[in-house]
Image (cartoon, rainbow, N blue to C red):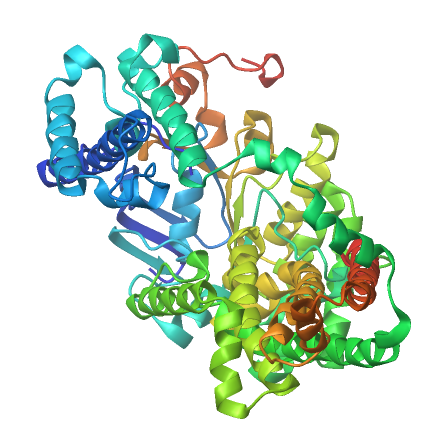
Amino acid sequence: MSDSAIKVEDLGMVYPGGVRALDGVSLEVRQGEFLAVLGLSGSGKSTLLRCINRLIDPTEGRVWILGEEITGAKGARLRKMRQQAAMIFQQFNLVRRHTVLTNVLSGALGRSPLVSSLMLSFTSDERERAIAALERVGLGDRFTSRADALSGGQQQRVAIARALMQEPRLILADEPVASLDPALRHSVMQHIEALNRDEGMTVMCSLHDIDLVTRYATRMVALRDGRLVWEGVPAEFDKATFREIYGEDAQPASNTGF
Amino acid sequence: MSLDSNAAAPSAWEKSLARLQATAVDTVLLGITLLMVEFLVLAFSGQRGPTGLLWSAEQILDLLHYAWAAAGGLILAVLWNLFYRQLGVSLGRAWVRGVPEWEAPLEWTQTLRGWFAAVFIELTFFSGWLITELDLLTFLTKFGKAADIVRGLMHPSGAVLHEGLVLLVQTIFLAFMATAFAIPVAFVLAFPSARNLTRNTLTARVSYTVARTFMNFVRAVEPLVWALIFISWVGIGPFAGVLALWVHSVAALTKLYSEQIESIDTGPMEAIAATGASALQVLRYGVVPQVIPPFLSFTIYRWDINVRMSTIIGFVGGGGIGYILKPRVDLGEWGEVGTLVLLIAGTVWLMDVISAKIRERIV
């Protein structure tokens, strides 16, 4: 149990409209792993990731982060646990009208005192850390720009710097490169890989590009209609598995090598 | 979150509730149709009233059989919903439960529902024409009497120019103070009035309902009525006008602000919540930056509206330029009225230009 980063047990989610998004999902991510989550859009990947840090409250099952149960946690305890798991989003989700620096600083909100944070005021130590985080993603010179003045790839790198600022033990990434130009995908993925390799952060990342999965993940799971249908390492992934996950009609893109 | 399959089938209870809603909507529509038909029949029957003259619109409205129409509407609605397989689904059912698949490809002329809607709209227009006593002939031939007023307006008199300018300044400040005091109250009330922020807990849902109901009530009461209330409270003068416009502005701005909050991108909120931030921090970082520019633009627009409204408020004693406009209208001093109207029009035009420029810059 001590090296478990994320543990999910019989997780189920039914949305208020009656749509079932997750059904009896159980999995465990060990510390230091890079777990890729595969599946068609609508298979429940986003819901699964959001149930882990409780942006969405699952209707069934339990979730542990670093051995501590997050399902049922409330208030300060829930926020403390969320700090441990930074999230990266498909749409970057930066505050568009804030500067790049303020966006990165917002990663530290869980630790900053309430009153000064409401006035957008941070300590000089926090500023230095934020600029250091921006330098790591290669944007050290852009900290005064408004977030929406940056390109998509740059915005996602700011989001990674924000995650870094949070000093988390794990990263939850929801299709982090799906809205980026294919040429930029590797540059963003490499930054996430560096967090995993150099900082020892556990990564759980949904991806739909098989190429990226086999290149970066150490282990993968697949969802279909909200159920876990496959679990393995990239080397075991083959044509039959592809059909199982994506259905009989699916065609692997020509560059996936199958 | 688009997800296929497994949508839960509606329960029997939900089904009968939907049927009830559909029938209620149909009853109202069919009942109104029956009333409009009766109205038109009576209007064109040539029957004369007790005075020997033709009935006026009000008299006919008074004669209609409302209870019978309601009963008839109910019977027709029930029948339509019972025999929907033969007649096609009713408007109410289409509204409550959507158009069923087998009728979706039909043109409106191929369904009873479509024809009913068309007839309903026609009937509304013709009864409306008669109820509001539209009279094109009078409109086109009796301009002469109004010519005096128009001539006066086109020859403004200088006699009230000085007094008018002084009160114009008061009017602008009156509108400004009402707007300024409305901002903080509306800003605080806007968050509990926004649907997307008040879905999660019971207290939040209750606060939403309370805030919305209260604001809708306040907004429904005309500023003129508020002015009368405050005039008897604090006396005739601009202060009563400020209070009246303030109350109305709070309600109007709360609605505009909260609708703006409802239309924000929830992504940044999610991202800030995921850092372990508290609810207030999520509001400050995830919501406020997105809504500040539209809030500013709505507020300036509101000031603009308040300048226009304060003229009418002044009519009943709420201070400002309207206060001296009213007696001149009553006395038929059209030249002086013309001066004051020009002053108001010029100010409104100027405020409109300025507020448009400011809004352009900040959005």
Task: Name the one closer to the observer, B150 or B294.
Answer: B150
- Expressed as whole percent of the image width and height from the top left, the position of residue B98 reads 30, 27
Task: Name the one closer to the observer, A2 or A167.
Answer: A167
Spot the residue most to the right: B158
- Expressed as whole percent of the image width and height from the top left, the position of residue A152 reads 72, 42
Spot the residue most to the bottom: B234
The residue sitting at 38% across, 32% down in the picture is: B127
Task: Name the one closer to the observer, A29 or B362.
Answer: B362
In which quadrant is the N terminus of chain B drawn?
top left
In which quadrant is the C terminus of chain B drawn?
bottom right
Left of A200 or right of it: where is B306? right
- Expressed as whole percent of the image width and height from the top left, the position of residue B165 reads 84, 76
In the rendered image of this protein, does residue A179 appear above or below residue A9? above
Left of A209 or right of it: where is B157? right
In the rendered image of this protein, does residue B114 appear above or below residue B276? above
Q: Quadrant of residue B168?
A: bottom right
The residue sitting at 23% across, 30% down in the picture is: B34
Note whether residue A205 is visible.
yes
In the rendered image of this protein, does residue B17 appear above or below residue B328? above
